[in-house]
Image: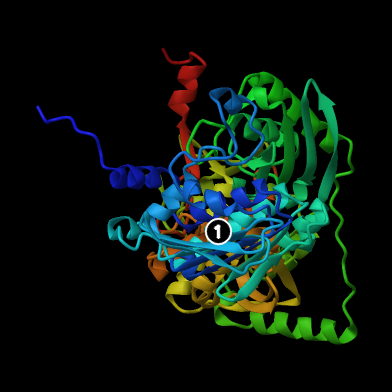
Amino acid sequence: MNQISVLSQETIDKIAAGEVVERPASIVKELVENAVDAGANAITVEIKNGGISLIRITDNGSGIPGEQVRVAFLRHATSKIRTVEDLLTSGTLGFRGEALSSIAAVCQVEMISKTAGSITGIRYIIEGGAEKSLEEIGAPEGTTFLVRNLFYHTPARKKFLKSAATEAGYVSDLIERMALSNPQISFKFINNNETKLHTSGNCNVKDIIYSIYGREIAANVVKIEPEETQGLTVSGFIGKPVISRGNRNYENYFVNGRYVKSAIIAKAIEDAYKPFLMNHRYPFTALSIQIDTQQVDVNVHPTKMEVRFADRSGVYEKVYQTVRDALAGRELIPEFHIDTPTAAQQASEKKKQTEVSEKPEAKRYPEPFEKIRSQLIAEADSPYEVRYPHRLGELRTVTGNVGHPATQERIRESGAAQQLELFEEKLLDEKSRKRHKLIGQLFDTYWLVEFEEKLFIIDQHAAHEKVLYERFMEKRKKKQQTSQQVTPPVIITLTLQEEERLRQHLDEFTSVGFEISHFGGRDYAISAVPDNLYGVADRTLFTEMLDGLTDLSEKASAEAVLEKIASMSCKAAVKGNSRLSVQEADALIGELLTLENPYNCPHGRPTIIAMTKYELEKKFKRIV
């Protein structure tokens, strides 16, 4: 049995640092929270190299008295609590007394601090937990921390850090949330000598939303006025459903001024939005939740990101009802403003459309309808109109009269050329298509095809996703990807993390047909899109494509990025619960079955399922 011994203070400090200091953002969080607790109304955060080489945090708070500077860096030294009972009533962001000692254990730290009324300030240097110097110095009121060379003497931990840009993104995300939760404080964030965020501290949360997320989101938020119920108050802003996202990154909620993650609060918000959003869409929120400190436990984890509530159901009900009432009482129909193009713009657009239609790769389909149009008009007795929207390919609109079943059969026969085989029965083989029956659409989503002794059910959304994906990848492979100009350009406002993601993968976006340029600040202009996305590539689709790249590693290959972009471009596919004409469905099914693997969409869901006549007869007890 190994001998039991007491760890050295250095080892204890490094273990504690491992719980508190995970990356540069962890340091920024602890020091900014200390500045807030010190009563600062102006806080500046500056980082270089993602905060790995330098973090400078300056505040105009109360400062640290000279005689207490050394004590402040001891483990479990804090001015926030005195007894265990204080844990239940503490209203400050920090209270554990681990931050400064943990940071000093793994970094080179310099602190300059001066209290109100003091003639001079104190400059204190501590590196790797060892004091280097302490001296008096002239300084303004408040505190400045300079933290250099994170993990400089623990390289094993440094290798787990991500790139400088990614680490800077984590810091940016933190500062944005601190600004939202403390609108009375002016926050300034500087990254590599460039100011990324500067709030006024005028207590106007909507101004901060505008500064962080841009005009589109700020223009589509609903204000929630504070209303107390049994010691619980919810206030802030929530987004209208039109600005939903594909992940939870825009769900911000704060408990007693502290940004936290809570499953019960997230569920209340998402349940309230459920009638207003599609599946897998998440809202924008910036909610402030004030609750009696004795009813919430924030001492769950060293990072204080998790909380426990004494009355979980009460918190859920209050948040749910507040959000639901705000949504139900508002007009949520989005407004679209259409700019009437000038004569010159119309002529230019017509020329572009003509150029695109004349390109060889644009002729994906034969022209069977033109060939038989005169016959259709001559023999039919009821009007028809075959509509081919851009989302199903580069087809045309044909009008005439269709009345006889034989005529409709001829339309189906000529709808696609040289179809490949599917399944052993050759569902839409050239020889078999005369015998298959496109019965109709079920629930505005599934198309029913009868052939031989089977019923085939085709999911129109999954089928169109597959067609778009394969079309996208085929053009990419043959280097035939073409672009379509967007007039006027689509302007999008990105967060710092989204901006970095775009810069990192801009070459891949360009290679598939996007033309994207910097438009000033954090705005970018999309002036061209891949031709198969023309008309559907809006702000929402593009930000979803960026979101989809979040889970890729920084070393992901260009091909992996392109496949992800292609997969996300399938968002342009026709949705379920959308009614297509028989001719549109037939054209879609025809192209699907020309693919090498038509059986699954790019995300793995089946496009086609089948049920035999034998299985149906067993269900109806015709066969025992």
The image quadrant of residue 85 is top right
* Residue hosting label 1: 171
Q: Residue at x 62, y 29 (%)?
A: 264
Q: Is residue 401 visible?
A: no
Quarter in which the C terminus is drawn: top left
Q: Name which residue type carries label 1.
A: Val
Please state the horizontal and vertical placement of residue 128, each as a whole percent of the image: 35, 57
Report whether 7 appears left or right of 459.
Answer: left
- Compared with 287, 595 (above or below) is below
Q: Residue at x 68, y 40 (%)?
A: 254
Q: Residue at x 69, y 41 (%)?
A: 257
Please state the horizontal and vertical placement of residue 385, each as a whole percent of the image: 78, 58
Q: Secondary structure at mark 1?
A: helix
Q: Residue at x 46, y 67 (%)?
A: 164
**545 and 135: which is toward the camera:** 135
- Compared with 585, 153 (above or below) is below
